[in-house]
Amino acid sequence: MTEASTASPATVPAQHGPSGRRTWVAVGALVLAVAVLIGIPWVAGGFEQRTDLQTVVAPGTTVTAGPYEFTFSAGTVQKTKTYSDAEIYRVVLAGTGRVTGNEAMTPDTLNWRFIAKDPRSPAYKEPASQQLGAEAHRGSSGGSFFTPGLPAIPYRLTFDFPADELAVGPDIRLGVRILDYRDTSLLQTGDFRWAPTDRLYRYDLPLRRLADDLD
């Protein structure tokens, strides 16, 4: 029995034939492409926190995020319980909002454009709810819009952190995504809408601790 007869059919061409060389060239090209895809973001800081994508603004600053203008000034934090008796820290960030176009709109609650980050721990959350207008209706989501042509109205975001995740301190970070109006369809078929970018405004907002409400 010869050496060639003991080798599998896949092994011999891979070592000696032209198709084997083509296979290794293809594999090499794929590895190189993956290395480039990983290497470029790595050099650019894509796998780390990209501070160049954040615009830090002071509390009380008005920012423009697509068709909206928001202003956030401060917040409160309170230890409370959910309906299932789980203890949480409820963070409510207060500000104002308005729409700059000619269409009544409200921020999408299925694809939030906000995120709250605890600067003292890895904890972060998207809003649990939003509230437009009067303080008496705090905690409600949906059913309200920013009316075009009117001045800014009260706007609040509520974030619920598990009690064992949030390291309560004097402040919290709020990220507000910057939106672009662009074609969001995969094949660029003209489906234009406001969509988030990888850029955001970052507030470092003061927090006021409220008495626990665990009853």
Image: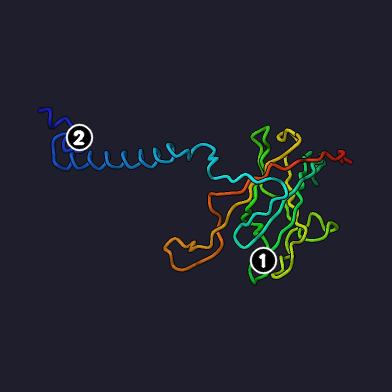
| Residue pointed to by mark 1 | 105
Q: Is residue 147 above or below residue 117?
A: below
Q: Residue at x 68, y 63 (%)?
A: 106
| Residue 196 circle label | none
Q: Residue at x 18, y 39 (%)?
A: 21
Q: Residue most toward the left?
A: 2
For the N terminus, give its image quadrant.
top left
Mark 1, secondary structure of its residue? loop
Q: Residue at x 35, y 38 (%)?
A: 35
Residue 158 at what x, y percent from top left? Answer: 75, 49
Left or right: 206 as drawn, with respect to 117 = right
Which picture quadrant has residue 214?
top right
Left or right: 38 as drawn, with respect to 20 = right
Q: CA distance from mark 1 to mark 2?
A: 63 Å
Q: Residues within 10 Å of mark 1 (few under 14, many from 20)?
A: some
Q: Residue most toward the right?
A: 215
Which picture quadrant has residue 26?
top left
Q: Residue at x 43, y 64 (%)?
A: 188
Q: Mark 1 or mark 2: which is in front?
A: 1
Mark 2, secondary structure of its residue? helix
Q: Residues within 10 Å of mark 2 (few under 14, many from 20)?
A: few
For the C terminus, give its image quadrant.
top right
Q: Is residue 100 above or below residue 74?
A: below
Q: Amino acid at mark 2?
A: Thr
Query: How many numbered marks does the figure carry?
Result: 2
Query: Cβ–Cβ below 8 Å for labels 1 and 2?
Result: no
Q: Earlier in the sequence, mark 1 or mark 2?
A: 2
| Residue 11 circle label | 2
Residue 121 at what x, y percent from top left? Answer: 67, 33
